[in-house]
Amino acid sequence: MSVTQHLSTVPRARSLRELFAADPDRARRYVIEVADLRVDYSKQLVDDRILEALVAAANDAGVAARRDAMFAGEHINVTEDRAVLHTALRAPKGSIVLADGVDVVPGVHEVLDRMGELADRVRADERIRHVVNIGIGGSDLGPAMAYGALAAYGHQRIRCSFVSNVDGADITGVLADADPASTLFVVASKTFGTIETLTNAHTARVWLTDALGESAVADHFVAVSTNADRVAAFGIDPANMFGFWDWVGGRYSVGSAIGLSLMISIGRDRFSEFLGGMRRIDEHFVSTPLAANAPVMMALIGIWNANRLGFATKAVLPYADGLARFPAYLQQLDMESNGKSVRLDGSRVVDETGPIVWGEPGTNGQHAFYQLLHQGTRVVPADLIGFANPAASPLGDLRRHHDLLVANLIAQSEALAFGRPDAEEPHRAFSGDRPTTVIVADRLTPSVLGQLIALYEHVVHVQGTMWGVDSYDQWGVELGKELVDAITPELVGVPKPERHDAATNALIEWYRHHRQ
């Protein structure tokens, strides 16, 4: 039975006004405190009966069993026949995590120790002032997001930049004010063959060698890769190559060597705190009953919103400017994982899967798209994220700013939930019943950021289990790559393109005609 069929007979909840009036204790009972996070889902359109039905559906779908299989190293990524062990990246020394009978923890910590040694050297080297991470997708979004979020903990001398777009304007902008002698490049590509990343890396190499000569490559480039031959051919010393494993998907890899630029910025001890925050949520996810399990309950409420209430999107609205890239990070995590239409067994899904995830930081979004959230015809569930205390600032005490920021978060959650339906003028009426989950913590620390990442990772896992899809492959990106390989030479070559459809052939001809 599909999730939609399972829930089709469960009555919808009354309005949030009625739910709160009928249950004065709702604001206390519909809150889960885990690690440093307070997850409040009391303003979601659910009641006890609905939550019981959702937990029953999770039990029927085998959520606990598949969770345990993931942590045990079973090949739950069935289409690629791989284990899924990003959780092993934050396993403590001395623990045992088996993948195909081999304990992976020693190898994880060997790479972390080598990363720490490099980070220590770079942080102590007065010559290096700029670290440029060249990657794309998971090799960019994770470290870029985390670097911005933890800017208050960054090294004062070293700034990090991130190049991902193959549009030459991206790398041009990053290197416009850079000094070759003080720049270190981190090239992140598992195979060292990702075309966008290698195109940018070769441009960076030319920029460096034009200024400093060929010998400078070994001192100014490091690689995050598993392909030693290609790394060496590029000119990078394999001793400065940091690997990771096929049981780590790119969008789950920020805790691996992909996070090297982040570690250089915040230092190995803070990076350890970051991993420790992830581990605290892992432990909660594994050991807590489903009905009190924060990622499980968030996932099930998301299932209810998508499959019973028909809400196709989800907004992530961090009231913290440091989390400006967090919605984009979650966009890849969720949409690349669960944007699937085929089940594990090869059959077509019958449920709507993978919500469209989007968002911007508050308060900016309030002056952009909140009009639709409050009075539009589409209902958009939202996660609001905030902190009791601001990040440290060289400008001194900015508490007045932060009080206003948090006041906006709280006001928006109230307005979205309860609205103002009885306004005298229809244009000033707000229907309310716009569901939100509010996630708060004391402050945005490395540990708390790790907790937020792991929380959403496990939400995605549970929802993928409920829908019966493989959350850990991404075959949907392959066709575009194959066509790029065919079209690129046609844009500049002599043969007339004829093997595509008429519109594609015309676009290629147009480009060839206008290309200077």
Image (cartoon, grey):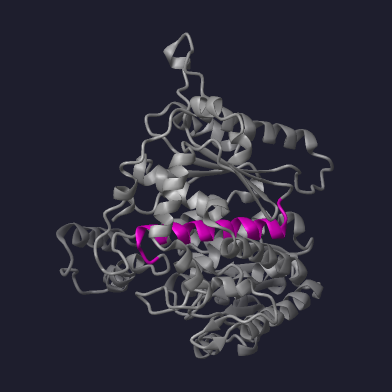
86 lies above or below 93 = above
Q: Say which of 4 and 324 sits in front.
A: 4
Q: Give the image location of residue 260, x and y in percent.
A: 65, 72
Total marks shown come to 0
Q: Give the image location of residue 290, x and y in percent.
A: 52, 56
Splitting the image into 4 quarters, where does residue 269 fall? Answer: bottom right
**Is-magenta flag for residue 454?**
yes
Q: Is residue 374 visible?
A: yes
Residue lying at 50% horizontally and 78% vertically, measured from the top left = 73
Q: Give the image location of residue 46, x and y in percent.
A: 47, 38
40 lies above or below 501 = above
118 lies above or below 411 = below
Q: Say which of 29 and 250 sits in front.
A: 29
Q: Is residue 332 visible?
A: no
Residue lying at 52% horizontally and 30% vertically, measured from the top left = 417
Q: Say which of 496 and 170 sits in front.
A: 170
Q: Give the image location of residue 389, x and y in percent.
A: 76, 43
Q: Which residues are magenta?
A: 444-470
Taking 4 as reference, is 72 left or right?
right
Q: Which residue is situated farthest in the right direction here?
A: 396
| Picture quarter with the C terminus | bottom left
Q: Say which of 282 and 115 sits in front.
A: 282
| Picture quarter with the N terminus | bottom left
Dominant secondary-structure state across the stretch colored magenta = helix
Splitting the image into 4 quarters, where does residue 253 fall? Answer: bottom right
Taking 24 as reference, is 249 left or right?
left
Residue lying at 59% horizontally and 67% vertically, measured from the top left = 254
Q: Which residue is situated farthest in the top direction here?
A: 424
